[in-house]
Image (spheres, coloured by chain):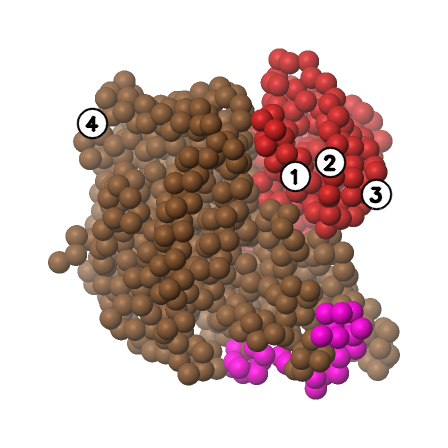
Amino acid sequence: MSILDSKIPEGPLADKWTKHKNDINLVNPANKRLIDVIIVGTGLAGGSAAATLAELGYNVKAFCFQDSPRRAHSIAAQGGINAAKNYQGDGDSTYRLFYDTVKGGDYRSREANVYRLAEVSTNIIDQCVAQGVPFAREYGGLLDNRSFGGVLVSRTFYAKGQTGQQLLLGAYAAMNRQIGRGKIKMYTRHEMLDVVIVDGKARGIIARNLVTGEIERHSAHAVVLGTGGYGNAFYLSTYAMGSNVTAAWKAHKRGAFFANPCYTQIHPTCIPVSGDHQSKLTLMSESLRNDGRIWVPKHKKDVDAIRNGSLKPTDLAEEDRDYYLERRYPAFGNLVPRDVASRAAKERCDAGYGVNQTGEAVYLDFASAIERYGKEQAYVKGLNVDDKVTVTKLGKEVVENKYGNLFQMYEKIVDQNPYETPMMIYPAVHYTMGGLWVDYNLMTTVPGLYAIGEANFSDHGANRLGASALMQGLADGYFVLPYTIGDYLAHDIRTGEIPTDTKEFDEAEQKVRGDIEKFINNEGSKSVDHFHKRLGKIMWNKCGMARNEKDLKEAITEIAALRDEFYRDVFVPGTEHEYNEELAKAGRVADFLELGELFAKDALEREESAGGHFRDEYQTEGGEAMRRKEFQYVSAWEYKGQPSEAAHHKESLEYDNIEVKERSYK
Amino acid sequence: MNLTLKIWRQKDANDKGKIVDYPVSGISPDMSFLEMLDVLNQELIEKGESPVAFDHDCREGICGTCSLYINGRAHGPQTKITACQLHMRSFKDGDTIYIEPWRAVAFPVVKDLIVDRTSFDRIQQAGGFISVNTSGNTQDANAIPIEKENADKAFDAATCIGCGACVASCKNSSAMLFVSAKVSQFALLPQGQVEATDRVLNMVKQMDDEGFGNCTNTGACEVECPKGISLENIARMNREYLSASLKG
């Protein structure tokens, strides 16, 4: 039997969460005051958890590496948040959201977790509106919805292209209320560098004050990681520059299993890479696929003409365009899930139809939407629907109202006006479905150590649907963890404050200091970025949108060699007693260099294609992902000193409430 | 492109600080301003010198971390963008570019171009929230219809990224645009009415305690705000403040 106990409650799917809440231990309000909880990361998951636990009465210490909790990268989420409210009356329900999410994840997520997520999704919207989050509304004053990839209903709530910002500011405001009451002690510009285990339980962390360089000990009765994903292993991604795997990786090295590291989301609509100087990639929200149509030219001669500038895309006749998503997937069209859309773009570009100089771009075109909306407005206003100038003007206004900030963002970066010429887009690393293994209570394999939001693995399987990350982050932080953590903390009401002058804290602090000194004293010659960029190239070329045995084996060898070279030859300027960004980056890249190898190892082990994990060897004749029944499990890796020696554990996935079938969007 | 950079270097909060000249070459017009600084920093690191410390994170104009005063303007010569969205095509070959941190008593310099903006957080902690429990057991979201116009205005105010450009641009180092954006967001929504009186009084008091200056209606903040937060918000906050003061 597997040593992984997912602790999924007994009983019918729809009753599990309610029953579980009724069964688990509670901590009485007076005793909560005796219990400390550390939360690392203040994005949607960490921020909402910190606010809620503080409100319940626990003493919370929250940590973020940014200068304010409001700057966590959840802020950059654009398109929206799903909830099974069925306000549109289009047939949505908890079951449908559950079904879409499991199917969207290519049948590689846990039924019970996903059902709970769908169940609490509606509370999130109620909660956020009560907090004053300004969601988009219709003229009747009620909330508006739009549609996202991989679904046939409109269940996505949004605040223009800044939904993540508005939700995070809601959680930040809830945190501020508790900071003002003294229930949260906030540590900004602090980075967690190790988790401290006492008697087998997570009892604290070692953190570095990024301004002064001081190494600090912090103790608590439980530690919660809401530290996001590890997409920056690819160097270029839509993540923030500071996003990193360090907290999760240190937890892994202290005994937390790492699940499905190879499940990465490569988002189809990002601004293409423009040159070697590039430091990050910018996403164009999936919501754009509600109205934008994706295409490349049908004929190579037109591709050449577009590339050398002799033909404008707007001048290419309709019949000479290949709207390849509409062609291949008539039922879902431009709104297929992200993994499918990304692979389809790669397929066209690999075949030589890419429309920019590098051959890695496709068009996202709003001309039809502008015309359609313009005509609608012309009718409403009683104007001439055949007057092209008027129709275009009115249509542009509608599109601007819906996506204005995204269009502006595009224009600032690319220096082209997307109202006049189609956007150019290409897939980029965007999200990681893999993460620390957690049970139904969101606890890792280390007692008292929890992982929430993107940092855990549990809800999205092998592919995440659009507008589901915000949902999961807030569900975990506001509505799941605050219940489940009580079950564990109920045993700690008599423990008293955890001392930090113990040998466990000594050992962890010594290790952290040792690692830092090694970097500062290393007589290397190359910058941290030099190694990070090289790691990114290996990851993108060999562990990217399509993977195969040969590439993955090479990646494993190359990453291990690069890691050796990094420790030998990295140069970190300055000292450890000051603000030193290079030093912080060195620690993060060191962890990416270990994670990257485990990532490739996991991808090699998974001899099937599922969601974002596509193995060339396992595809259907039509080029679609081919799942294999014998891989219907979660891979959870146990640290054994080196990534290459990680021990493989399996959690079998059972589907009792949903029929596992070919994931078709045709 | 070849450029001369004149950058503020200051070792820490206690250091006096000075402008140091750095030539950079081979800059592509497609680089973002921060990527140009990355190039400089890589060169400095290779020479064994200390790289220029500057704040940055999302590099897509939404986190509000970047905070550069470029040629005398917050976030540089373009309007309605942050420094990370500024591209080198806005400059010419041979240009000299001054890069300084935000200057305000309430934003002390941490190092080089990095300032401490936790005063903004403390203002929000004083009242920038609606006191509802995060239980999810509130009323149904659609039980509170909100006129679209007000919802849209509340949203516009709520898009403030808290970067501090308004303070840096103001000759008085006033934080009125920042504070009024949050006060307005809640003033425009029915959910915000219950605590409206205390909110505006507490937030304004905290703003004053932090050492931000007064507003003299110059309007520089609105011009330099990367998110186009409108001066109307300041007018709205003044009305809120007046009526709250009368209520006591």
Do marks 1 and 4 share a subunit? no
Chain that bears disc 4? A
- B125 versus A531 height, above or below: above
Q: In the figure, what tint was chain A given?
A: brown
What residue is drawn where x is 34% and y is 51%?
Answer: A598
Q: CA distance from mark 1 to mark 3?
A: 17 Å
Tag on residue B24?
2
Q: Is residue A41 visible?
A: no
- Magenta-tinted stretch: A304-332
What residue is drawn where x is 26% and y is 41%?
Answer: A641
Q: Secondary structure at mark 1?
A: helix
- A302 versus A196 height, above or below: below
Q: Amino acid at mark 1?
A: Val
Q: CA distance from mark 2 to mark 3?
A: 13 Å
Q: Is residue A451 magenta?
A: no
Instruction: Identify residue for label 4.
Output: A494
What residue is drawn where x is 62% and y is 79%?
Answer: A323
Chain that bears disc 3? B
Q: Position of residue A452 (x, y in %)?
A: 38, 47
Q: Secondary structure at mark 3?
A: loop
Q: CA distance from mark 3 to mark 4?
A: 68 Å
Q: Nearer the viewer, residue A436 or A9?
A: A436
- Asked if the residues shown at circle 1 and circle 3 are in contact, with their CB atoms under 8 angstroms apart, the answer is no
Instruction: Identify residue for label 1.
Output: B39
Tag on residue B92?
3
Q: CA distance from mark 1 to mark 4?
A: 55 Å
